Amino acid sequence: MPSTLNAVAVFCGSRFGKSPLYKQAAQNVGHTLAQAGIRLVYGGGAHGLMGVVADATLSAGGAVTGVIPDFLESREKMHEGVAELIVTDSMHTRKQIMFSRADAFWILPGGFGTFDEMMEILTWKQLGRHSKPIILINVEKWADMLLAALDAAVEQGFAAPTARAMIECVPDVETALAHSQSAEKTDRVAVEQL
């Protein structure tokens, strides 16, 4: 039975990056989620691609949940237009709440924080803690080197091919939505196979 997609956690940069296509993709994510009636769960910031995704979702009439640690209030500036803004006491709590609120995870261009979120949610899936889709939207091939590092871990014997297959790379938002909507809840891989 296909999984129910009510909310998607989007991991992305608190900066814009160098290509204008990153911003366009973030806007497309926000509009797409809103039009599909899917809640955006994101890092709660108003700057960079995070702010773009939230603004686009809100402008298209969508629902947004922002989750941000209190110590980032001044650094990332909390998004004041988000109706549901959860302020946490730590990064760990932030990620746990985002995980619990989401039915799927989409990764857009970003930096170290985005990599951290992606790797943690991927590791949790590898360890059998969830079976939710993890989809990397490879805008302008921004993540090719990141994917190469994951492939190298498999080639060097540090990860199983089944673990590497738990993150899917797609070229655009439309494909991410289609794959998220068709993902099976029963795709959990036994930990002993990893």
Image (spheres, helix red, strand yellow):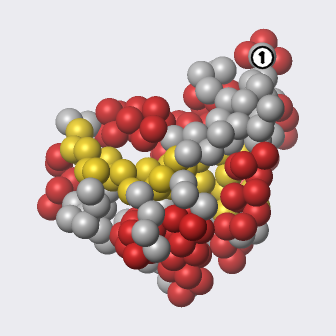
Instruction: For residue 63, say whether it is visible.
Output: yes
Q: Which is more toward the observer, 9 or 151?
A: 9
User: In what quadrant of the picture does the N terminus appear?
Assistant: top right
* Residue at left offset 76%, top offset 57%: 178
Q: Amino acid at mark 1?
A: Ala
The image shows residue 109, relative to residue 160, as above or below, that is below
Q: List x then y, in percent, for residue 78.
A: 22, 61
* Residue at left offset 43%, top offset 69%: 61
Question: Position of 69 compared to 128: left or right?
Answer: left
Count of number-bearing discs: 1
Residue of label 1: 190
Q: Which image quadrant for residue 154? A: top right
Question: Position of 45 compared to 165: left or right?
Answer: left
Question: Position of 181 compared to 61: left or right?
Answer: right
Q: List x then y, in percent, for residue 10.
A: 51, 55
Name of the residue lying farthest toward the bottom: 20
How crowded is the residue under tag 1: few (<14 C-alpha within 10 Å), some, or many (20+)?
Answer: few
Which type of secondary structure does the marked residue at label 1 adopt? Answer: loop
Name of the residue lying farthest toward the top: 192
